[in-house]
Amino acid sequence: MLSRSFVVLWIAMAVAVMGIAMVSPLLPVFVREELHGPEFAVALSFSAIAISQIATSPVVGRFADKFGPKPFIVLGFFVYGAGGVGFIFSQTWEQVIFFRALSGVGAASMFPTTMAYVGRLAPPGFEGRYMGAFSISWIAGFGIGPLFGGTIRDFVSSDAAFATMSLMLFAVGVAVFLLLPKGQPGAGTDREYEEEALEPGLPMIEVLKRPIVHAAIGGHMVVSIGWGAGFTFIAVYVVSDDGLATGSATFAGVLLAARALFTAGAQLITGPLADRMNRVFLSVLGFGIAGGAQFIVPDIPGVMTELSIFGGTLVIVPWLLLLFLVVGLGESIEFPAQQAIFVDAGRAVGMGTIMGITQTAGGVGFLAGSMFGALVVGIWGLDAVFRYAGLAMFLGGFGFWLLMIRAKRDFAMLEAAAAADLRARYAPEARQAPSPAAALTAGNGAQPTDVTHYGMSETTQPDQSLRPAMAGVDRD
């Protein structure tokens, strides 16, 4: 696993996302308090990034499949960094929104292509392990970044936080340009899973018809709907009088950081688990745990505890902190299982294509969750938004299960192709395997009943006879 490509991208993504997360929560405050923007401008200063991501992610992902992901990864870092420079020189809220949208173009180029690159590094049967380990980088960055960003703003200025983000993004862009290996990631050698040319995948019109793609889109959108509602209103719930009335924005940051860091750390276990168990079951289980925890947020005891930290006082609600760790547990279970499913789908329809499409689905889900959550708050009050987020996760998990049943034949074909690919690569006497895209479009005799844990049939788990030949790949 620890190839140069993986390590370079892991470190780059951790640093970049930490910089991004430093700034995102500050922009609404910057627009309201320093630029005196109206309420809709405050909302757009946060959500404009998702709007531009929705528009550009599928296009970038498709081009990355055609020309290779490295140029788009590097471009994404630089474009996002340029957005941070724009914040520094913005004199009006309209300019802030423009540069926030520009940052979304950078994110659309950076996130799906990086995930696609790592997906191509993963050998068949090890998708959960690779994607779970890699996701630790950006989940932890999202958890740590807001704490750093708030500190820099409070002790220096908002401009200092924007400048710090830009420097971090530019630095990792240069590092990736210089250090990421040339060529296309793939399964070309025993020691480094990174030199095989890309397969072209399917035409876009065929991609959008496949049940396998519908399942991937639906699964990611579900997570983002619940996440969008909860993320948007948790700080308001913690601070405001119609919530817990702690008055502590710092505690809201602690909640989000604790949830993200727990999610990241747990994937050291849940990532490999996704390669050994039924991935649909793990995804639905994770949806249920995270959704149930969000649903009961209004029911937890609001007992507050004051902690003395560095001469100051931090007000916390211990039961809410524990509940957010449970949310993190659910997310850590479903995330690597879903990402492994995306990788399997990407082998057939184009890795960058599927990551770009799911990125768009995530953006749509986040916007829908946030906007509908606002409507719920306006009609039924702040407590109701967490009921809505929990129900969305429950219903979404059921919908994802139905979509996966519909896509079962697609996955059976891919699993058979993956098993043949393993035998061809590591057993010299084996015949050359068909490409996953060819297996998906032409079929190869696989039936839905061949799928034992989909998405992982036992045939895709490297058997003992292949272990010596795979010694350079199967490593922690």
Image (spheres, rainbow, N blue to C red):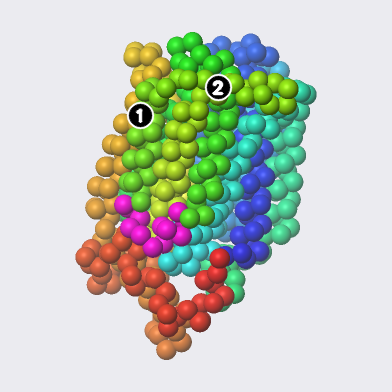
Residue 276 magenta: yes
Q: Residue at x 33, y 40 (%)?
A: 288
Q: Badge 2 is on which residue? A: 305
- The disc, 1 or 2, on the residue closer to the chain's N-terminal end is 1
Q: Around disc 1, counting alpha carbons within 10 Å, would you say few (fewer than 14), some (14 to 19), or many (20 or more)?
A: many
Q: Nearer the viewer, residue 323 or 179?
A: 323
Give the amino acid type for the residue marked by disc 2 in the picture: Thr
Q: How many marks?
A: 2
Q: What's the magenta region?
A: 270-281
Is residue 179 left or right of 57 when viewed as pictured? right
- In the displayed structure, 69 sits above or below 362; it is below
- In the displayed structure, 309 sits above or below 455; it is above
Q: Badge 1 is on which residue? A: 295
Q: Around disc 2, counting alpha carbons within 10 Å, would you say few (fewer than 14), some (14 to 19), or many (20 or more)?
A: few
Q: Nearer the viewer, residue 287 or 159?
A: 287
Quadrant of the image containing the C terminus: bottom right
Q: Position of residue 376 (x, y in %)?
A: 36, 19
Quadrant of the image containing the N terminus: bottom right
